[in-house]
Image (cartoon, rainbow, N blue to C red):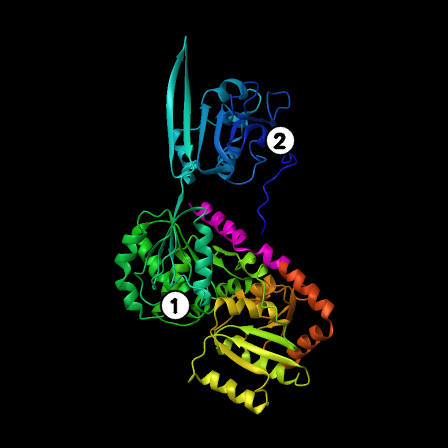
Amino acid sequence: MKNINKTKNFNMNKKIIQKFGSELKLDIGCGKNKKTGFIGVDIDKNSDVDIVASALNLPFEDSTVSEVNSSHLVEHLYPNEVPKFFNEIYRVLKKGGVAKIKIDRDWSERKLLKKDPEHKKRYSVEEIKEMVKKFRFSKVKRRIYRYGWHIRQKIFVELKKSPMKIGIITSSLSETNGWGRYSLEIVKELKNFGEVKVISHQIEELKEIETYPILPPPLGNSLKKIWALLKIIKYLKGCDIFHCLIEPYAPIIALANLSLKKPFVITAHGTYAIQPINKKGINSFLMKFAYKKANKIICVSNFTKNEILKKCNLNNLEVIPNGVDYSAFSNYEPNKARPNRTIILSVGPIKSRKGYDASIKAISRLKKENLKYYIIGDIIPNDFFYKQLKELIKKENLEEKVKFLGRVSNEELLNLYNKCNIFLLTPKNVNCKVEGFGLVYLEANACGKPVIGTYNCGAEEAIINGYNGFLVPQNDPEKTAKAIKYLLNNPEVARKMGENGRKRAQDLSWENIVKEIIKIYEQSL
């Protein structure tokens, strides 16, 4: 997941930065005529350059260069290399950065055609405009010059990396549920890459973010979503791209886009990405329509991707897993008082697909162990499944070992993540209701805890079996208990898995995840 765009010359940049300061200006393909105050970059070692490098692989990190100048370089490139050159300029330019490029349309025919017929290509203004459209601000002009008896044509290109205008569609920006937490973290990172506008169901205020609570509940009546269509079109108008972060709104966004005609992306998590397309009726038709019309569907796991492909013939799916706010979880200092017994922790709403019945049965096989099993998650007192779990606890005489804590504060959640010995969540697939990924595994890993999940669901994306935790079969209390017992009896293995979990969580930080999402946006524009 790490974004590495460096070459063997990258170490040279430190000296260049010391010489020219943080405002990096590049003169690419300068030869012996480097522009004053610019860093000379050329592939020719004998040129007056500061860095020897290819224009197609500049040794600078993303968004670090404020200005680019290039004169008569495009003529030296093969036709298939020219778009790559513009993409490389886009990559290194800062937000608001400017590039000025001169192209001599006649030079290739006059000098290179005799040597290499591949250089016969002469670019029109329209072709150049198509190559640079991702900049969202460009001036491409053709000028004609007379030199004695000769007439020469040049194309002047001026580009500016304008902030991307991103429209986000979600239910909420909240830490109290999976959709809300995913949306909140994505939006917090996206604002570093462009101007973000959010339309949602719940009212939220986030610094530097425009939010408009115009949407009906995500799981509400479909007709209400249709009524919101005109509002959606009004508020998304002006965005370069929009991203539906939760599945229930995907059909209405696809319908809105018949008017807006902009690229759009859908994130497919789990249950609500899979359940509609496994049924018949209008909802199934509309979801399949949305999937077909989307420029890209970001699946949070290979499991979700494969489940969608079972029902839809698509080629626009890509897996980008969920992330974690690594610093928030890894830097937290728990209360100094240490528990005198082992703590097993689960986090997630009390739903059958979370597999709490199998987890409780596994704990019942460890009655001799001095442990406590805490379950954090929203409780509906009269819910049938919750009542079943309470009866199971009573039947197994686990009242002193198993505790439902309900919803807790973020502070208490962090405290328990750091105090627990093992994180346990054993999801199961129940009538197309599935665990698409499991943010909680990464959160526990970020706190250095080994995790236990199940096969044949999104947990496989978060957990590398034997590395940062264990995977066990669904609905298998016996093997779940054995995995817990093994970690309790082998503290060094548990510690090593916790360390590996930290590395895994660090690689899947939201910063890295959103960089991958930005690449999807740029490919779609």
Q: Which residue is mark 2?
A: 15
Numbered label tally: 2
Q: Is residue 168 above or below residue 126?
A: below
Q: Secondary structure at mark 2?
A: helix
Q: Identify the residue at horizontal 51%, vertical 24% (top origin).
A: 37
Pick the front one: 330 or 166: 330
Pick the front one: 285 or 470: 470
Q: Which mark is residue 38?
A: none
CA distance separating discs 2 and 1 = 59 Å
Asked where in the image residue 446 lies, by quadrant, the reply is: bottom right
Please provide percent x and percent y for residue 388.
Answer: 50, 86
Q: Which residue is mark 1?
A: 284
Question: Which stretch did the figure color magenta?
Answer: 503-525
Q: Earlier in the sequence, mark 2 or mark 1?
A: 2
Q: Identify the residue at horizontal 37%, vertical 26% (top origin).
A: 141
Q: How crowded is the residue under tag 2: few (<14 C-alpha within 10 Å), some, or many (20+)? A: few
